[in-house]
Image: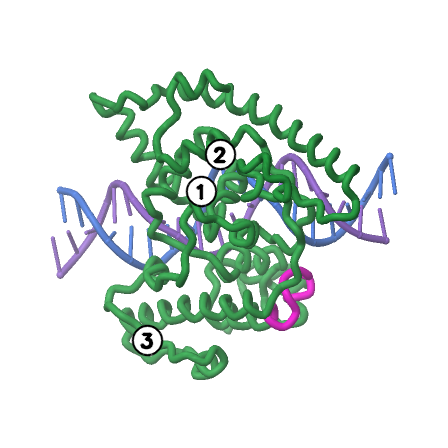
Chain colours: A green, B purple, C blue
Amino acid sequence: MGRPPSSHHHQNMLKKGPWTPEEDIILVSYIQEHGPGNWKSIPPNTGLLRCSKSCRLRWTNYLRPGIKRGNFSDQEDRMIIHLQALLGNRWAAIASYLPERTDNDIKNYWNNHLSKKLRKLDAGPDSQHHQLTNSQSNILRGQWERTLQEDIQMAKQALHAALSVDHHSNPVINTNSNSNLLIHHHEPLIPRPPSAASYASSTQNISRLLRGWMNQESRRSGHHSYLPAAWSMANGSSPSEDHEGTLSYSSYSEVSQPEENTIGQLTPETHHSHCRDHSMAGMDLHDHEAPALNLIEKWLLEGGLPTADDLSLL
DNA sequence: AATGATCGCAACCGCTTTCCC
DNA sequence: GGGGAAAGCGGTTGCGATCAT
């Protein structure tokens, strides 16, 4: 074999492009052992020819436990549409309302499905009475964003005040029940050590993934899977508990997660657990502590679009 | 059946923000 | 407080899958 293309650097050539199952296994097992974080240490310690950033991305967007992909529900659709109208293309903020979805997924879903769907709806001759024209929703967005910013400031001040008064108890907002708004869903992130349970579900995740790969591989080329007896041994389940023949990326999501939460039942736990790299996060005062968001939550839960009356409340 | 067009999504790029010494 | 490293984030790309002709 000749020398690799453009190898004038003395440093190792870092691999790019799609991850292989082998690489995933290496990454996951390393993280199982050491926890997420320390991304810089991963390539040298595992031999992965990937940059630390690629490792982090692969973990946070794909291998991390608790990720659901594909099969967006109608309710999720509505939430994304509403939140996008409210927040613009701030995918991370939007994702913070959707447990088990990554911002990358939501962004892709928006670009590929929802924006088109909306455009079609908008262009429709008899759009619903509650549909807004483009210019209306631009105005709306402006108003909401301004209000939101004010609310964020208020929330931060309130939180700061609460913290400075009450030192001895857990400074989490929802102990005060006079505001049963969004707050209890969107407490500041509390760093948690990675739990064994979360790693177990990571194993499920990758197992699903590998199953899909195997099926794809055998369907495509007929040659036997290079996948690992070792893997099924490691995760304790046979990789062949599977179903229909048409398998692709989206097929992973057909293995539904047990006890899935609906939007209305979000617990702080599930809310927090999906945030990017929550283990590194401290107090996370994103947009979601804004008290006035309870209005928005109402809209989200009821599934309608905000009316002019709603607007006037802002 | 062949092939060109379009779609869907994982991964990358590069800029911004946060962290840490 | 400043400077470098890491993380966060949103836009964009690359490519396999699927659809249309």
Q: Is residue A178 visible?
A: yes
Residue A241 circle label: 3
Residue A107 circle label: 1
Amino acid type of the residue that numbered disc 3 sits on in the rendered structure: Glu
Q: Point out residue A150 in the picture as x, y percentages from the top left corner.
A: 62, 24
Name the chain letter of the residue that bears numbered label 2.
Answer: A
Q: How many neighbours does mark 2 have within 10 angstroms: few (below 14), some (14-19), or many (20 or more)?
A: few
Residue at x 40% of width, y 17% of height = A309
SS type, badge 1:
helix
In the rendered image of this protein, does residue A309 appear above or below residue A22? above
SS type, badge 2:
loop
Specify whether residue A38 is painted magenta. yes
Q: Nearer the viewer, mark 1 or mark 3?
A: 3
Left or right: where A223 falls relative to A284: left
Residue A70 circle label: none
Residue at x 54% of width, y 56% of height = A60
Asked if both marks, 2 and 1, belong to the same chain, the answer given is: yes
